[in-house]
C-alpha cells in the first residue's frame, strides 16, 4: 500500500492540501491500522472526517482507502499470476 508521503502528495495535487493528519491517522498506528481501513466503517469514519476536515477531508479519507485497495489488489493479482506461471512451468506447461 502506498506510504503516507505518497498519499499526502496525491492529496496535495488533487486539492492543494496534503491532509497529512488523515493519512497518518489511517496508517501510522500499527495496532489500529486494519480497523481504520475497514470499509464497513466508512460511514462512521467518513462522518468524523467531514466534521473535522470538511467534505474535502472526507473525500480524501475515502480516496486513501481506494488507493490502498487498488494497490493491494494489484499486488495480489501480480502474485497470483506469477504463482500460476510458476506452477504451469513446474509441470512443463508453457
Ligand atoms: Zn492506508
Image (spheres, rainbow, N blue to C red):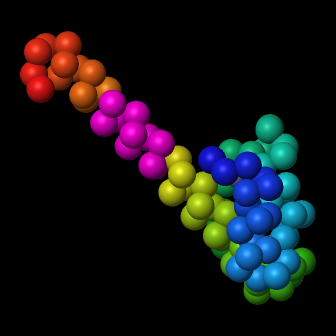
Q: Is residue 14 visible?
A: yes
Q: Position of residue 11 (x, y in %)?
A: 75, 72
Q: Position of residue 42 (x, y in %)?
A: 65, 67
78 shown above or below 86: below
- Which quadrant of the view contains residue 36? bottom right
From the image, give the main secondary structure of the stretch colored magenta. Answer: helix
Q: Residue at x 84, y 43 (%)?
A: 29
Q: Position of residue 30 (x, y in %)?
A: 80, 38
* Closer-to-camera residue (91/37): 91
13 shown above or below 27: below
Answer left or right for 3 relative to 51: left
On the rendered image, what quadrant is the C terminus found in?
A: top left
* Residue at the farthest bottom position: 55
- Which quadrant of the view contains residue 48? bottom right
| Residue stretch in magenta | 73-82
* Residue at the farthest left position: 93
Answer left or right for 59 relative to 83: right
21 shown above or below 31: below
- Which quadrant of the view contains residue 88? top left
Q: Is residue 44 visible?
A: no
Residue 84 included in the magenta stretch of the image: no
* Closer-to-camera residue (22/86): 86
Q: Residue at x 64, y 70 (%)?
A: 63
81 shown above or below 37: above
Residue 80 included in the magenta stretch of the image: yes
Q: How many marks?
A: 0
Answer left or right for 79 relative to 26: left
Amino acid at each position: 500500500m502506498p506510504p503516507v508521503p505518497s498519499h499526502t502528495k496525491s492529496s496535495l495535487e488533487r486539492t492543494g492540501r496534503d491532509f497529512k493528519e488523515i493519512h497518518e491517522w489511517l496508517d501510522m498506528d500499527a495496532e489500529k491500522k486494519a480497523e481504520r481501513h475497514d470499509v464497513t466503517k466508512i460511514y462512521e469514519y467518513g462522518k468524523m472526517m467531514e466534521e473535522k476536515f470538511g467534505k474535502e477531508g472526507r473525500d480524501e479519507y475515502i480516496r486513501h482507502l481506494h488507493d490502498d485497495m487498488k494497490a493491494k489488489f494489484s499486488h495480489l493479482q501480480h502474485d497470483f499470476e506469477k504463482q500460476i506461471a510458476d506452477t504451469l512451468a513446474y509441470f512443463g506447461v508453457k
